[in-house]
Amino acid sequence: WRAYLWGLVMSRIGNKPVLIPEKIEMNLNGNSIIVKGPKGELTTEIVDERIKFEIKENELLFSRTSEAPEVRSLHGLYRSLVANNIEGVLEGYSKTLLLQGVGHRATLKGNDIEILCGFSHPVLFNQVEGIKYEVPDQNTIIVSGIDKALVGQVAANIRAIKPPEPYKGKGIRYKDEYVRRKAGKAAVTAGA
């Protein structure tokens, strides 16, 4: 009964056709969907045989041969992955990280980033293939690339070096991230 209701509520995103813009060249090669654009090339492997895809005019259509919950979710997932690849090779993705705290700063060392964030030594974050780093000022790092998942993962790895702490907010955070603050020990005892 719950599974039936869940099926009614589940997203229908897999049924939406993916529009192929003029600047994009798309090739189907077996189970692979290869997307080429001005910024590069990305490939999505469709590993489940129950998900079918075809190009009609300037649209990529996905269909499924089963109504099983895992197939329904994969249907939407693959559609989203290909749509993200098209956006990536057209415009690219970027994440901005901010360093907060006295003495916290970042500098480019060749293709790598050197981060000073309160440790006794600087942390060197190495170049990842397909990812570009920018340091417009010493407290900002911009991670950009064409693969949405890879950009997000690299940004998360940089943030994990020193996540923001809840008392003064020191650390590395995303630009639009809200860090919930806690009252310090002195504020708690003063209020009692």
Image (spheres, rainbow, N blue to C red):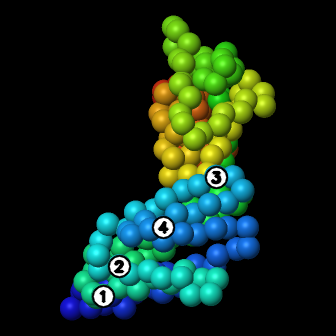
**Residue 156 relative to residue 21: left or right:** left
Q: Secondary structure at mark 2?
A: strand
Q: Give the amino acid type for the residue marked by disc 1 in the picture.
A: Thr
> In whole angstroms, how far apart are the C-alphas of marks 3 and 2?
26 Å
Query: Do residues under tags 4 and 1 come within 8 Å of each other at their CB atoms?
Result: no
Mark 3 lies on residue: 40
Say whether residue 104 is visible.
no
Task: Count the numbered circles shown.
Answer: 4
Q: Secondary structure at mark 4?
A: strand
Query: Do residues under tags 3 and 2 come within 8 Å of each other at their CB atoms?
Result: no
Looking at the rendering, which quadrant does residue 114 occupy?
Answer: top right
> In whole angstroms, how far apart are the C-alphas of marks 4 and 1?
19 Å
Disc 4 or 3, which lies upstream in sequence? 4
The x and y percentages for residue 69 are 28, 80
Neighbour tally class for label 4: few under 14, some 14-19, many 20 plus, Cα within 10 Å: some
Residue at 52% across, 63% down? 34
The x and y percentages for residue 14 are 46, 81
Say whether residue 107 is visible.
yes
Front disc: 3 or 2: 3
As displayed, is residue 92 above or below residue 14? above
Camera-nearest residue between 159 and 34: 34
Mark 2 lies on residue: 51
Q: Secondary structure at mark 3?
A: strand
As displayed, is residue 19 above or below residue 106? below
Mark 4 lies on residue: 33
Q: Give the amino acid type for the residue marked by disc 4 in the picture.
A: Ile
> In whole angstroms, how far apart are the C-alphas of marks 2 and 1?
7 Å
Camera-nearest residue between 151 and 103: 151
Q: Give the amino acid type for the residue marked by disc 2 in the picture.
A: Ile
Disc 2 or 1, which lies upstream in sequence? 2
The x and y percentages for residue 147 are 56, 52
Camera-nearest residue between 170 and 15: 15
